[in-house]
Image (spheres, rainbow, N blue to C red):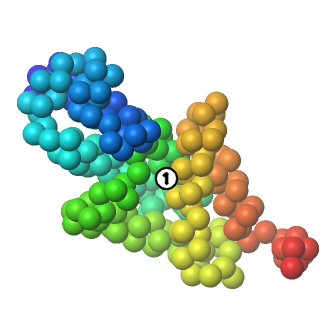
């Protein structure tokens, strides 16, 4: 693919992600206009709005996959891996703000999502076994809460860099779900 074509594709996908996050029914013409490209350019690449939407979701999941690989959730020290993962996913949420639940009926998207969830759950079990996270919480609770924290950080802390927002999320996890001092936890019971 030529460099200008690759640039236009990235621009269309990122613009599409942003506009689709605001309005799931946005048209290809509106996405093309906002991206500054001719709508025929978009239609040459995508036969339908659904094809464009699927490409946006694939791009988001490609980015998530890269974050999981870079975080080294199975090999890196848990604190380092946690921060890398959180920072990376916040950045993905900034770049690709679409909600993937709209595409869960597509088997390949659903399968990829389930793989990501399994990998993060495995990591969270490791973090618990190594004493970073509390073991007295219901199974799966941290994994259920983490995506909401990541989304809230991306949307509600725009003045912070992804690294700074990750600091907030990790601090929330460690101090909210962390092992901590037993007497501090007892004060809330």
Q: How many numbered badges does the structure rendering display? A: 1
63 sits to left or right of 122: left
- Decide: is 4 above or below 134: above
Residue 6 visible here: no
Residue visible at 71% across and 67% down in the picture = 178
Front residue of 103 and 187: 103
Residue drawn at x 28%, y 21% as measured from the top left: 33
**Which quadrant: the N terminus?**
top left
- Between 131 and 114, which is closer to the camera in this rendering? 114
Q: Is residue 85 above or below residue 117?
A: above
**Residue 162 location in percent, x, y?**
55, 38
Question: In the image, is 188 to the left or to the right of 75?
Answer: right
Residue nearer the viewer, 57 or 62:
57
Locate residue 144 relative to residue 29 in the image: left or right: right
Q: Nearer the viewer, residue 165 or 103?
A: 103
Residue 53 image point, x, y percent: 25, 45
Residue at 32% of width from left, 37% of height from top? 26
**Which SS class for mark 1?**
helix
Relative to residue 139, is residue 88 depicted above or below?
Answer: above
Residue at figure coordinates x 59%, y 74% from the top left: 141
- Crowd class of label 1 (few under 14; some 14 to 19; many from 20; radius 10 Å): many
Q: Residue 19: name its quadrant.
A: top left
Q: Is residue 73 visible?
A: yes
Which percent across, then down, holds residue 78?
Answer: 56, 62
Q: Position of residue 150 (x, y in %)?
A: 55, 52
Q: Which residue is mark 1?
A: 85
Which quadrant of the figure contains the C terminus?
bottom right
């Amino acid at each position: 693919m030529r460099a200008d074509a690759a640039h236009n594709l990235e621009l269309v996908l990122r613009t599409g992600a942003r506009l689709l996050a605001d309005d799931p029914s946005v048209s290809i013409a509106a996405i093309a206009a906002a991206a500054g490209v001719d709508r025929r350019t978009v239609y040459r690449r995508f036969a339908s709005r659904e094809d464009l939407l699927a490409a946006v979701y694939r791009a988001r999941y490609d980015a998530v996959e890269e974050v999981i690989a870079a975080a080294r959730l199975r090999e890196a020290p848990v604190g380092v891996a946690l921060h890398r993962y959180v920072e990376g996913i916040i950045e993905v949420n900034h770049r690709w703000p679409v909600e993937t639940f709209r595409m869960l009926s597509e088997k390949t998207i659903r399968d990829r999502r389930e793989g990501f969830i399994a990998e993060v759950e495995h990591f969270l079990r490791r973090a618990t076994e190594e004493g970073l996270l509390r073991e007295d919480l219901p199974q799966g609770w941290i994994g259920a809460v983490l995506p909401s924290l990541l989304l809230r950080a991306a949307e509600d802390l725009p003045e912070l860099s992804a690294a700074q927002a990750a600091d907030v999320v990790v601090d929330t996890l460690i101090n909210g779900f962390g092992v901590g001092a037993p007497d501090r936890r007892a004060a809330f019971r």
